[in-house]
Amino acid sequence: MSDRSKAPLLPDRHPQANLFVCDVADAVIKSDMASMEHPIFTLSKKPIHEVKTYEHGDILLEVTPSSKGIANIYDKDILIFAISQIMAARNEGRPYSREIAFQARDFLEFSNRHIGGHDYDLLKDSLDRLDGTRLRTTIKTGGEETWEAFGLIEGAKIKRKRHDGRVTEWGLKLSEWLFKAIEANEVLTLHPDYFRLRKPTERRIYEIARKHCGQKETWQIGLRKLKKKCGSSDALRNFRLAVRELCEYDHLPDYSVSMKDDMVCFRNRNFTPALPGRGYTVRLELDTFDAAREAAPGWDVYVIEQEWREWVVSLLEQGMEAPRHPDGAFIGFCRKWAERNGRP
């Protein structure tokens, strides 16, 4: 039974923190698309010591734990923090690399956590699990397919003062696989309230909605398929109850959620239809965006989509006809975009 005495979202624990925290102030929250699309992280806080496998289409994923267990979705917050810092530096023209040095308090405030002594211990445990979790996968990052064992990070460190044991710096080195995704702009912005979601299933559902619904008005998926993409080990009836509760409270950032006959529908809260005569509002198929990413590797296809729609509007204003096959026309536009602009 759910605990209805709790608010659906955690409190905003550091509402003014971003005004003071070094580069974090400019770091828009971002995550890599691969881990938003596929269930790399476990949803359980309890140590999972079994190898986890996932197959979907031509995607194969095998996650192997260390003695500390598989990295969980809360451990992923560290990677989101690192990706956000790298993207902020990249966008501002500052130097960046796979190696990240940071202060623990900066991370804890960034991810809306408590800042007590125990929380620093939990951060160390998260780094241990991230460092020990190994992947074998055919998921592509940066346009390259990898089938080999590698970690989410390639080591972590904690520097202490010798005389008093005080920690002066935390650090980690991202895997080359994950860094390729960043270099190829295969990242998406997350709503700040992502860190206020209480339950791991809710975080995972938000990631999937953000990846698939994106800027579109609506997107829907069957309950069984959503459960599989979440990587949930719950019985289907329990997963169904969790989704129903999410629909009832309707507190997911960016998207409103509804379910009918085990079909889950996400509606973009921020969708604004174009004005009649000024916009081209045809709906593209979901698979079209996957093909668009292959046609224009590294580019944000939703940015290109907006350019494409404005281009179609300009044709209509000249008295020309709209594309008869919009999906194919958009993919072709992406391919020409990449030829004209190269890699980002």
Image (cartoon, grey):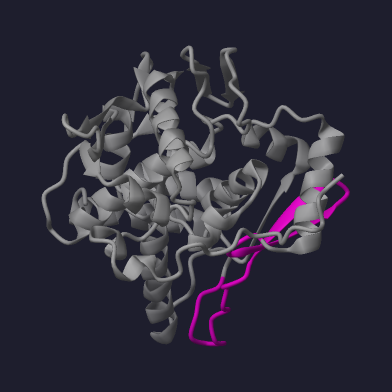
For this rendering, which residue is in front, 267 or 27? Answer: 27
Residue 266 colored in magenta in the image: yes
- Which residue is painted at 43% across and 34% down in the image? 121
Say left or right for 162 vs 26.
left
Residue 111 lies, in percent from the top left, at 45, 52
Residue 317 lies, in percent from the top left, at 42, 86
Residue 123 lies, in percent from the top left, at 41, 36
Compared to residue 251, the image places residue 197 above or below, namely above
The magenta-colored residue range is 252-281
Residue 28 lies, in percent from the top left, at 35, 61
For this rendering, which residue is in front, 66 or 219? Answer: 66
Compared to residue 7, the image places residue 46 above or below, namely above
Location of the N terminus (image quadrant):
top right
Residue 114 colored in magenta in the image: no
Q: Main secondary structure of the magenta part?
A: loop
Compared to residue 211, the image places residue 171 above or below, namely above
- Which residue is painted at 44% across and 50% down in the image? 115
State the residue lying farthest toward the front.
163
| Residue 79 picture quarter | top left
- Which residue is painted at 42% across and 63% down in the image? 305
| Residue 5 picture quarter | bottom right
Marks counted in the figure total 0
For this rendering, which residue is in front, 173 or 114? Answer: 114
Residue 133 in view, yes or no: yes
For this rendering, which residue is in front, 91 or 102? Answer: 102
Residue 142 in view, yes or no: no
- Which residue is painted at 49% across and 15% down in the image? 65
Say left or right for 167 vs 204.
left
